[in-house]
Image (cartoon, rainbow, N blue to C red):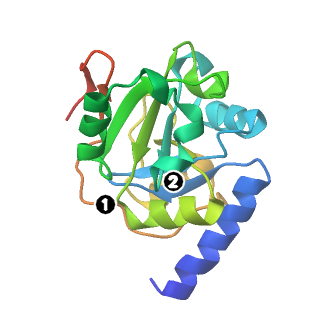
Amino acid sequence: MSKKHFLNSLLFCIKVLRSKNVIAYPTESMFGLGCDPNSKEATIKLLNLKKRNIEKGLILVASNFNQIKMYINENVLSKEQKKKIFSFWPGPFTFLLPASSKAPFWITGKFNTIAVRISAHISIIKLCNTFGNAIVSTSANVTNMAPSITSEQVFEYFGRDFPLLHGEIGIEKNPSKIINIINGRLIRYA
């Protein structure tokens, strides 16, 4: 794939995100669906595509901590907890952190925590940096169906015209591990 092809798809995906719509993009282990987490309209579209309940909450992915800072309540995290988080980031680790009052309920679901990941995947870094914010990250599939490992699978689920950031998925074999920083429990693991 050429740099020009990637750049064209990146610019198109940014336009789609800014128009309160949903895109698919490569992550560390599969294709993900994403949208602007600050847009209830976009998030509802994503939940409807996946047939996912709003109460479950969603993960946010970012290229740096500043992009997720507004969504978390940093004041209740200890220095040790912050040190642990940053020892895993950037990377394929999602942390459940205390949600700030600015974290929208359509992202947190029924929880008082928010799931966030700082990615080392180049496509996600470029996507978030160009968009200027974190984006929603959930597997590109219908709930309880197999996740999309190829762009063809994305198109099978959501149609040939579905907005897609062209790129390669990473080398991880499983979705990101999810760690609850408050109690240290591993929620999802390989």
User: Residue at coordinates 64% horizontally, 60% vertically from top-left?
Assistant: 131
Which three-letter amino acid code belongs to the residue tagged 2?
Val
Viewport quadrant of the C terminus: top left
Can you tell which mark lies on residue 47?
A: none
User: Residue lying furthest left in this view?
Assistant: 190
Left or right for 173, reference 21: left
Q: Nearer the viewer, residue 94 or 65?
A: 65
Residue 13 locus on image (x, y percent):
65, 63
67 shown above or below 1: above
Task: Look at the numbered discs 2 and 1 and tell me whether their residues touch, using CB distance below 8 Å.
Answer: no
Q: Going from the N terminus, do you reach mark 2 or mark 1 first?
A: 2
The quarter of the displayed image where residue 144 is located: top left
Circle on res. 154 = 2
In this picture, residue 87 sits left or right of residue 45: left
The residue lying at 33 percent from left, 18 percent from top is 182
Q: Is residue 17 above or below residue 40?
A: below
Q: Is residue 110 left or right of residue 153?
A: right
- The structure residue drawn at horizontal position 76% and vertical position 55%, both measured from the top left corner, is 18
Q: Residue at x 47, y 30 (%)?
A: 74
SS at badge 1: loop
Which x, y percent locates residue 14? 68, 63
Q: Quadrant of the N terminus?
A: bottom left
Q: Which label was assigned to residue 170?
A: 1
Badge 1 density bin: few <14, some 14–19, many ≥20, Cα 10 Å: some
Q: Nearer the viewer, mark 2 or mark 1?
A: 1
Q: What is the distance, in whole Å, between disc 2 and disc 1 at their CAs?
A: 16 Å
At which x and y percent is residue 169?
36, 61
